[in-house]
Amino acid sequence: MKLIVRHEADEEFHLACAWMESEVSGLGVRFGDEVRKYLRQVSADPERERIRQMQGQEYRRVNLKSFPYFIAYIIDRETVVVFTISHSHRKPEHWLGRLEP
């Protein structure tokens, strides 16, 4: 399936990579590699993750294995749209306003 990463999600991803790399050399690279791996999996099999509901809106979410981050997305016809790549414990619902009701 076609994959679109919204601007906000891309920005969150790059900020997290930069911060991790500034803390520990190589950590941002490992994080980036894991995110890209999960994005490929989501694109290949987007219905693998269950549908979740929050504030009346449906989305799917995949949790990263090695980092406390998740990727939230919807399936829009033949396209996967990623809305956030977020830390699981720091305001994990901040992105919900990005979804169309």
Image (tube, grey):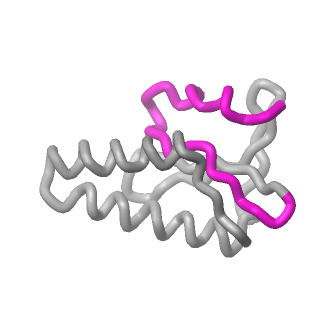
User: Residue 87's image quarter?
Assistant: top left
> In this figure, what is the number of numbered marks?
0
User: Residue 68's image quarter?
Assistant: top left
Looking at the image, residue 101 lies above or below residue 43: above
| Left or right position of 101 against 74 | right
Identify which residue is drawn at 38% across, 51% down: 67
Q: Could you tell me which quadrant the C terminus lies in?
A: top right
Identify which residue is drawn at 82% across, 55% down: 76
Looking at the image, residue 44 lies above or below residue 24: below
Residue 90 lies within the magenta run: yes
| Span colored in magenta | 77-101
Residue 41, image x and y in percent? Answer: 60, 71
Q: Could you tell me which quadrant the N terminus lies in?
A: bottom right
Identify which residue is drawn at 64% across, 65% down: 42
Looking at the image, residue 54 lies above or below residue 14: above
| Left or right position of 59 against 82 | right
Looking at the image, residue 78 lies above or below residue 17: below
* Residue farthest toward the bottom in the current orientation of the protein: 44
| Left or right position of 41 against 64 | right
Residue 75, image x and y in percent? Answer: 78, 56
Residue 3, image x and y in percent? Answer: 65, 64
Residue 29, image x and y in percent? Answer: 27, 62
Identify which residue is drawn at 37% across, 49% down: 14
